[in-house]
Image: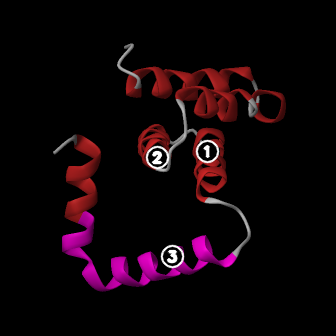
Amino acid sequence: MDFIQEHFKNLRDSHKELYDAYEEYGKKVYEAGPLDDKMKALIKIAISSTAKQHYAIKSQIRKARRQGCSWEEIEHAILLIAPTVGFPTMMEAMISLREEMGEL
């Protein structure tokens, strides 16, 4: 179990009722619209990247891969944030991507 999974499990186990309510809310939002799973995954990577949430970025990258997103699609989603939020923010997200790809 890696660092992210360990802390997620701790939160889920320590606050089960709150976690279950949050999980149900997230599921309803996820299923409510017309976007396909890959598009949702790429959007969530972009959101996590703009928020500069290193562990969230890595978690969303893993989820995107399970949804069938290629490394190239994920990289493109990250590149797209630069004009809006800046080059340094995009580069931070690229580091997370490279870590997940095993390059760092």
In the displayed structure, 15 sits above or below 48; it is: below
As shown in the figure, which amino acid type bears the numbered disc 3?
Lys
Number of residue marks: 3
Q: Are marks 2 and 1 in contact (CB under 8 Å)?
A: yes
> Given this view, does label 1 or label 3 mark the residue nearer the observer?
3
Please state if 6 lies on the left or on the right of 65 as rendered: left
Label 3 Cα crowd, 10 Å radius (few <14 / some 14-19 / many 20+): few
Name the residue carrying label 2. 56
Give the CA separation, mark 2 to mark 1. 9 Å
Name the residue carrying label 3. 27
Give the CA separation, mark 1 to mark 3. 21 Å
**Which mark is on residue 51?**
1
Mark 1 secondary-structure assignment: loop
Q: Position of residue 68 (x, y in %)?
A: 50, 44
Quadrant of the image occupied by residue 8: bottom left
Furthest-left residue in view?
Answer: 1
Looking at the rendering, the stretch of residues picked out in magenta corresponds to 11-32
